[in-house]
Amino acid sequence: QVQLVESGGGSVQAGGSLRLSCEPYGVTYRPTCMAWFRQAPGNEREGVATIDSVGTTTYADSVKGRFTISQDNAKNTLYLQMNSLKPEDTAMYYCAADYRWCNYNRGMAYWGKGTLVTISS
């Protein structure tokens, strides 16, 4: 059973940076897709970024140019480097993985429990 464990969340001021990590457990081979989602209080969950098995990345328009998704090829650890953070980036951030596709609109099979990011103005 695949388990995803996020870390790296915290509280920073606007303009600051954070790096989130997602450690996968129970993974026998590399997922087709790994992704970051976020959900702010009162809002629906939204896709933030994806990376597929060949390293192709996609980003939500709201984070393009500020966030970078990457993956350690040896350990399959997923990262999200977040720069120039804004108060509207405040949310619970979730790591997700899937072996079928790399499209967060189609849903993801495996989810972490999330790590909280709070940005103060």
Image (cartoon, grey):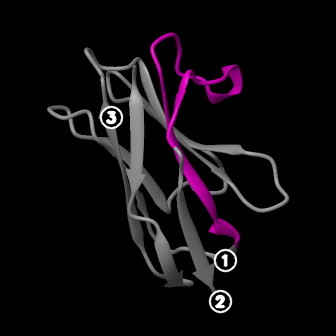
Q: Earlier in the sequence, mark 3 or mark 2?
A: 3
User: Which residue lies under the disc numbered 2?
Assistant: 121
Check the image and report above or below for 121 versus 93: below
Tag 3's secondary structure? Answer: strand
Q: Amino acid at mark 1?
A: Pro
Q: Quadrant of the N terminus?
A: top left
The answer for how far apart the CA atoms under marks 3 and 2 are is 33 Å
User: Which residue lies under the disc numbered 1?
Assistant: 87
Instruction: Give the residue at x 70% y 70%.
Output: 88
Q: Amino acid at mark 3?
A: Pro
Q: Amino acid at mark 2?
A: Ser
Label tally: 3
Instruction: Give the residue at x 53% y 14%.
Output: 101
Tag 2's secondary structure? Answer: loop
Q: Position of residue 59 (x, y in %)?
A: 56, 43
Give 11 or 25, whichever is nearer the viewer. 25
Q: Quadrant of residue 41?
A: bottom right
User: Which labelled disc corresponds to residue 68?
Assistant: none
In this rendering, position of residue 83 left or right of residue 87: left
User: Which residue lies under the disc numbered 3?
Assistant: 24
Instruction: Give the residue at x 45% y 69%.
Output: 83
The answer for how far apart the CA atoms under marks 1 and 2 are is 6 Å
Magenta residues, start to end: 88-112
Query: Tags 3 and 1 in contact by the CB under 8 Å rule?
Result: no
Q: Quadrant of residue 4?
A: top left
Q: Earlier in the sequence, mark 1 or mark 2?
A: 1
Q: Position of residue 121 (x, y in %)?
A: 65, 89
Q: Earlier in the sequence, mark 3 or mark 1?
A: 3
Of badges 3 and 2, nearer the viewer stands 3
The answer for how far apart the CA atoms under marks 3 and 1 are is 29 Å
Check the image and report above or below for 116 versus 10: above
